[in-house]
Image: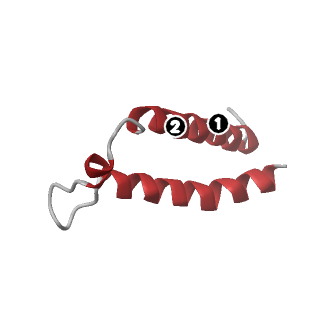
């Protein structure tokens, strides 16, 4: 069974890999494509990506600093 520290390190690595995957998957979209909504109450792709980037930036940096 992996230790908690190892599990956290694996999660950090996975998060960085997912960030790179998202960049590769969505950088080709135009602004209208990123901002398109299927419904006024739904989130656009750009809003979802912004939310994830803000969340990752807030929590990932703090976790990485604690792990050092």
Q: How is the image coloured?
A: secondary structure
Q: Residues within 10 Å of mark 2 (few under 14, many from 20)?
A: few
Residue most toward the right? 68
The secondary structure type at the circle numbered 2 is helix
Which residue shows up at 57% across the image and 41% down it? 15
Q: Residue 38 vs residue 35: left or right?
A: left
Q: Would you name the residue on which mark 2 appears?
A: 18
Q: Residues within 10 Å of mark 1 (few under 14, many from 20)?
A: few
Q: Would you name the residue on which mark 1 appears?
A: 13
Which residue shows up at 22% across the image and 62% down it? 42
Which residue is more in the foreground, 9 or 29? 29
Identify the image quadrant of the N terminus.
Answer: top right
Which residue is more in the foreground, 7 or 18? 18
Q: Residue 35 vs residue 39: left or right?
A: right
Q: Residue 19 vs residue 9: left or right?
A: left
Asked whether disc 2 touches disc 1, contact meaning CB atoms under 8 Å apart, the reply is no
């Amino acid at each position: 069974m992996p230790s908690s520290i190892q599990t956290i390190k694996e999660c950090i690595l996975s998060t960085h890999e997912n960030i790179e995957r998202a960049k590769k998957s969505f950088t080709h979209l135009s602004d209208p494509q990123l901002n398109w909504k299927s419904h006024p109450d739904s989130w656009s792709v750009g809003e979802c990506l912004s939310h994830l980037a803000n969340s990752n930036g807030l929590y990932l940096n703090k976790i990485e600093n604690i792990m050092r």
